[in-house]
C-alpha cells in the first residue's frame, strides 16, 4: 500500500483513497497537517457531505488550527444551523445562491461556518471556501450593564455555585470561561489583596486579576475546600451553554432584560472607571493589551460607584 504522507523537500504531501481512487490531497507545511488531511479524507466516503465533514472537523481543528476544546464546541454550536440546512449536500457542491440566502437569514452564524469550511480547504477537501466573500453584518444584540440591584438579585436567584460565580465576576471582571476553570491553587493572598491566576485566558493568555470585596471573601472561602472554586452540583466544570441557560432563566424570573453574564465584566470595569482608576490600570485588570482603548470605547459605562459595597449585603 502506498504511503499516505510523503516528504517533498521541506514540506509534506498527503494522499488518500477516496471512493476507491488514490487522490492527491495537497502539500502541507508540517507532517501533522498532512496527516490531518488524510484522516479527514478517509472516512469511508462519508466525508464528502457537509454533515460528514462537520462530524470529522473537531479532530482536524485541534491539529490544523490548534484550537481549544472550548473554541471547537463554540464554533460547532454557532454553525449548527448551517449543518441542519446543508448537511446532506456534497461538500464540493454547495449552491452559491442558497448559501447567500442562508447567510442573510443567519448573519451571526456565517463566520463560524466559514471557519469550518476553511479547514476543509486547508486539508485539501475543497479548492476554495464557498463562504469566502459572503459578508453579512449581524445585527447587534441590545445589551447593557446591569445595575447593582440587578447584580445582587441575580447572585441570589442563580442556582448552586453560579450565584457565587456571578458575584466574583462582578468583583473581578473575569470571563465566564476563566471563572469556570478556577481552582483553589489559583488563589493567593498578597498584602491583604486577593489575587487569582488565570492559567488560560482568552487566546490562551495567562494572567492575574485582583478580586475585590465582597467577592474576595467568597474566593478565599471556596478555595479552602480545594479543587474547582465553582463546580457543578454533580461535579466538574460549568460550560457556557449550561451557564447561559440558567442565567436566562433567572433573568426571566426577575424581569431583567438585555443583560448577559459577560456584562458583569462591563459592570466591574465601570466601577473601576467611576472610582477614578486610570484606563491603563483598568485594562491591566481586565488583561487587555490595548493600553485602555477598549476600556474607553466599550467598558466605561457610568454606574453607581458604591455598588460593590451593597452586593451581597456587605
Image (cartoon, grey):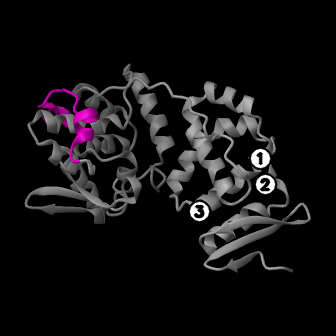
Q: Which mark is residue 47?
A: 2
Q: Is the C terminus in the top left, top right, bottom left or bottom right quadrant? A: top left
Q: Which residues are magenta?
A: 291-314
Count the marks: 3
Instruction: Report if residue 181 lies within the magenta region.
Output: no
Marks 2 and 3 close (CB-CB < 8 Å): no
Marks 3 and 1 close (CB-CB < 8 Å): no
| Depth order, front residue of 165/86 | 86
At x 23% / y 39%, what residue is drawn? 295
Measuring from the top left, give residue 276's x and y in whole percent: 8, 37
| Depth order, front residue of 202/28 | 28
Of labels 2 and 1, earlier in sequence is 2
Q: CA distance from mark 3 to mark 1?
A: 19 Å
Measuring from the top left, give residue 206's x and y in whole percent: 32, 61
Question: How many residues crowd mark 2 within 10 Å: few (<14), some (14–19), many (20+)?
Answer: many
In the displayed structure, does residue 230 sit left or right of residue 289? right
Instruction: Report if residue 296 lies within the magenta region.
Output: yes
Of labels 2 and 3, earlier in sequence is 2
Q: CA distance from mark 2 to mark 3?
A: 17 Å
Compared to residue 13, the image places residue 128 above or below, namely above
Q: Nearer the viewer, mark 2 or mark 1?
A: 1
Q: Which mark is residue 91?
A: 1
Measuring from the top left, give residue 217's x and y in whole percent: 19, 50
Question: How many residues crowd mark 3 within 10 Å: few (<14), some (14–19), many (20+)?
Answer: some
Furthest residue toward right: 20
At x 36% / y 55%, what residue is drawn? 201
Marks 2 and 1 close (CB-CB < 8 Å): yes
Of labels 3 and 1, earlier in sequence is 3
Q: Which residue is mark 3?
A: 64
Measuring from the top left, give residue 262's x and y in whole percent: 36, 38
At x 49% / y 52%, what residue is drawn? 234
Amino acid at each position: 500500500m502506498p504511503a499516505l504522507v510523503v516528504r517533498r523537500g521541506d514540506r509534506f504531501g498527503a494522499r488518500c483513497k477516496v471512493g476507491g481512487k488514490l487522490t492527491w490531497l495537497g502539500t502541507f507545511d508540517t507532517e501533522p497537517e498532512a496527516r490531518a488531511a488524510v484522516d479527514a479524507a478517509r472516512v469511508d466516503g462519508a466525508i464528502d457531505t457537509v454533515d460528514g465533514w462537520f462530524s470529522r472537523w473537531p479532530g482536524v481543528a485541534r491539529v490544523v488550527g490548534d484550537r481549544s476544546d472550548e473554541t471547537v464546541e463554540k464554533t460547532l454550536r454557532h454553525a449548527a444551523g448551517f449543518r441542519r440546512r446543508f448537511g446532506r449536500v456534497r461538500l464540493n457542491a454547495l449552491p452559491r445562491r442558497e448559501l447567500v440566502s442562508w447567510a442573510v437569514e443567519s448573519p451571526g452564524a456565517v463566520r463560524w461556518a466559514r471557519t469550518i469550511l476553511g479547514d476543509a480547504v486547508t486539508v485539501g477537501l475543497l479548492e476554495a471556501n464557498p463562504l469566502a466573500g459572503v459578508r453579512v453584518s449581524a445585527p447587534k444584540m441590545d445589551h447593557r450593564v446591569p445595575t447593582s440591584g440587578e447584580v445582587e438579585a441575580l447572585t441570589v436567584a442563580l442556582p448552586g455555585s453560579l450565584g457565587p460565580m456571578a458575584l466574583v465576576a462582578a468583583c473581578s471582571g473575569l470571563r465566564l470561561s476563566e471563572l469556570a476553570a478556577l481552582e483553589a491553587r489559583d488563589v493567593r493572598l498578597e498584602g491583604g489583596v486577593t489575587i487569582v491566576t488565570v492559567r488560560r485566558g482568552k487566546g490562551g493568555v495567562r494572567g492575574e486579576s485582583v478580586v475585590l470585596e465582597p467577592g474576595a471573601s467568597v474566593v478565599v472561602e471556596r478555595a479552602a475546600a480545594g479543587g474547582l472554586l465553582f463546580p457543578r452540583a454533580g461535579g466538574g466544570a460549568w460550560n457556557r451553554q449550561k451557564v447561559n441557560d440558567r442565567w436566562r432563566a433567572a433573568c426571566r424570573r426577575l424581569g431583567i432584560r438585555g443583560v448577559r453574564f459577560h456584562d458583569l465584566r462591563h459592570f466591574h470595569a465601570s466601577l473601576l472607571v467611576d472610582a477614578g482608576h486610570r484606563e491603563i490600570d483598568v485594562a491591566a485588570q481586565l488583561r487587555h493589551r490595548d493600553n485602555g482603548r477598549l476600556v474607553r470605547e466599550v467598558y466605561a459605562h457610568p454606574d453607581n460607584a458604591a455598588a460593590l459595597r451593597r452586593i451581597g449585603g456587605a
